[in-house]
Image: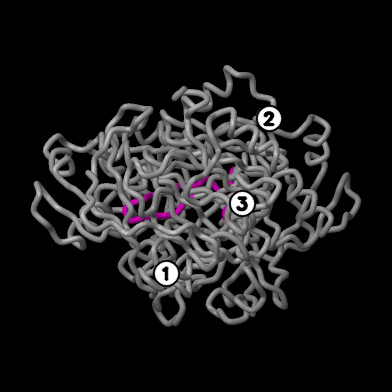
Amino acid sequence: MTPGATINSFNKGLNLMKQVKNFTDEEILAEATEILEVGYTFHYEQDLTMEELVDHCRRIGDTDDDKLGYMPFNPKDNPDIARVMPTGLFGHSDLHWHSNGTVHHLDEFKEILIGLYCKGSCQDTVFSILNNRDAFLELPEEEKDFWRSIELQLNLSAGGVMGDFSHMSDLGYDELSGLGESNGYIGMEKHTDERMTAVNIHPVGGEEFLYWQPPCIQRAWQDGKEIEVELLQEKYKAVLERTKYIKDIVFRPGDLLIMDQLYTLHRRSPILSKERELWRVAIDYTNTLDK
Amino acid sequence: MIIKKLQNYTDTELKESMYRCASNGYILLHDQEFTRQELVEVSRRIGNTNDSNPSMGHMQFNPKDTPDLSLVTSQPTGNDPTGMFGSSDLLYHHDSGVCHFGESKELLTGLYCVGSCPDTVLSLMNTQNAFNYLSEEEKEWWRNVETQLNKVFKASQGIYGTPEEYSSDPSMRNYKVFKHTEERQKVINIHPYTNKEIMLWQPAFLDKAWYKNEPIDIEELKDKFLKDLYRGRNIRDFVLREGDLLIMDQLLTLHRRSWVKSIDRMVWRTAFDYTNILGPNKSYDPDIEKLKVIKQC
């Protein structure tokens, strides 16, 4: 491998052209294993109904989303699917880096996988995935120890994950929380004394990873002493926001992405086409690697 | 982990990288660090950087001290208030403009990111891969197609996302381009460094087309192209971030760009060939430089 090249270094999951609805049990297990190893899998040119998508996801794990499931956007006959579209979940806004635990501390949510299936595309909308496990594991030991000494408290702050193009980007916790609940989102408990560590062990993969929810870090501590959040955010960016750890994707019809929410973060640019529609399913590993 | 800078590559490493570029269509290096002069110098280790495409070299956007380098940004540059291409989205194209196969010697475009916009995506379509996926019957169909390229978009949009974006950016309109009258090019040609079939496509400049010497409808041909080639498996998407260097082979790939949201986005562009690292370009006809070049408004 030529030094410095990243070509094909983060796309082990690509070129899976077989229809996932025809996967054998062995292939399902391989799929779950690859999600854990690479952080995601990606399949082109799939042809799935909503039922088939949910069936595929249920072969990997439970799809009973306890945080974002059963919202007004979710079809009544397929309530495990949320429709991500300009008139549905998240609207047209860009979204900051986040993973789908958002303001929940670890152990407060169970669906640690997200599947996204593309029904309609916007070729100007880029979805970027960041592998926060690999970024951490490649740090020098001294820097790893720094992050191991960090604790966080997550809460909704202005705009939450909604980006610059959202009308919600300036709203505070109470306004945002109230608006979310009125739109059908399940309410989020506010953390007061609770903390979580920045470095954690994946419950299935067993490897350390650096957890980052930039829009939701409200307070932080190093070795028990409170520290400046903004400085910590800059340090997070320097460690994580590097091309070598990021995969950029424009969803095209038939694409299916399944990603681990502890080993990866994602962001999205604004949606310019009303045609863009993703079907989102939250999953865990309980039918494959975590039985 | 220390990333090796391209300017520190040995000749063997550089040669391997560029052969990979000629085979795969691109290479992407991250965490690079160049001055403008260093970027031009390392491009010159690979090949000639004197952009022969009459519409792209030595423009007002190019710094006077490094004229082989263009500043691709929506910041004001030179006398232009919007910079090269402004903030417009750009349709699928390759950087040889209206040049036919063999008329342009700079087969490579290098894009080095100095300032990023996380919302701007550059999509790279590998037409050689796409062609290889086709059935033999479909391949044979394309082998019988010829095209003629010209600057035909005076009242339209060129490679810009919309006619409005084209009409609001006068910067690219007054550049010299080849005018083809009788000349045609095959859609399927042979890459001069890999000897493999390549598929040349430049929809924005398509003036005329023929199938087995019979004129065919251009719009129908564009539809067929989209159906056969515009598929996710043929496309890689990139957000260019600071320190990224993307080198693309213009015979194997097309690219498009979404609109630029951030004024901070700054990409340094060099056009070059493979001649100093992989040898002479046997497809290039130097006599083309004597061809009549016209100026269009």
Position of residue B60 measured from the top left corner of the image (x, y, whole percent): 44, 75
Residue toward you, A219 or B68? A219
Eye-nearest disc, 2 or 1: 1
Parent chain of label 3: A
Q: Residues within 10 Å of mark 3 (few under 14, many from 20)?
A: many
- Front residue of this view, candidates B245 and A123: A123
Which residue is labeled 3 in the image? A278
Instruction: State yes or no: residue A244 in magenta.
Output: no
**Range of magenta residues:** B238-255
- Amino acid type, mark 2: Lys
Height in image: A235 above or below B19?
below
Q: CA distance from mark 3 to mark 1?
A: 24 Å
Image spot of residue B98 (x, y percent):
65, 61
* Residue B251 on the magenta segment: yes
**Disc 2 chain ID:** A
Identify the residue position indicated by label 2 in the image: A21
Between B27 and A23, the one lying in front of the other is A23
